Image (cartoon, rainbow, N blue to C red):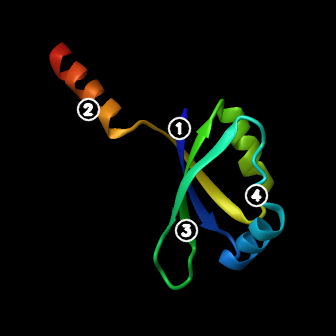
Amino acid sequence: MLYMVIERYRHGAAPVYKRLTAEGRLLPPGVAFVDSWVVDEPEISRCFQLMEVDSLQSLTQWTDGWSDLVDFKLFPVIDSQAAAARARGADAAG
């Protein structure tokens, strides 16, 4: 499963990047980092990460480990091709 993880840094970016540099992403088994994008703003307060996971439980295990520094919103996502196929199927049924 793919999840889009929206992060808002609770105390700014510096503590997050300090931990990341010192300890890595701290990913539990079943969670794989795909890519990330950071909002281009002076304070660097938000990040969007695409994660591949075995289960939502494994993803929340990871977010729990960062919750002192980051507020998270998690969204299951599919790629555009899968969305288009689903939409075509919905059109055919309606």
Count of picture labels: 4
Q: Amino acid at mark 1?
A: Leu
- 65 relative position to 72: left or right: right
Sequence-wise, the earlier of marks 2 and 3 is 3
| Residue 2 spot, x, y in % from top left | 53, 38
Sequence-wise, the earlier of marks 4 and 1 is 1
- 13 relative position to 90: left or right: right
Q: Amino acid at mark 4?
A: Trp
Residues marked 1 and 3 touching at CB (< 8 Å):
no
What residue appears at the point 55 percent right and 64 percent down from the top-left corner? 47
Outermost residue to the bottom: 42
Q: Identify the residue position indicated by label 4 in the image.
A: 66
- 78 relative position to 17: left or right: left
Sequence-wise, the earlier of marks 4 and 3 is 3
Mark number for residue 2?
1
Q: Identify the residue position indicated by label 2 in the image.
A: 84
Q: Identify the residue position indicated by label 3 in the image.
A: 46
* Element carrying mark 2: helix
Residue in front for this viewpoint, 81 or 71: 81
| Residue 43 spot, x, y in % from top left | 56, 83
Assess disc 2: are there few (<14), some (14-19) or many (≥20) residues with their C-alpha within 10 Å of its C-alpha: few
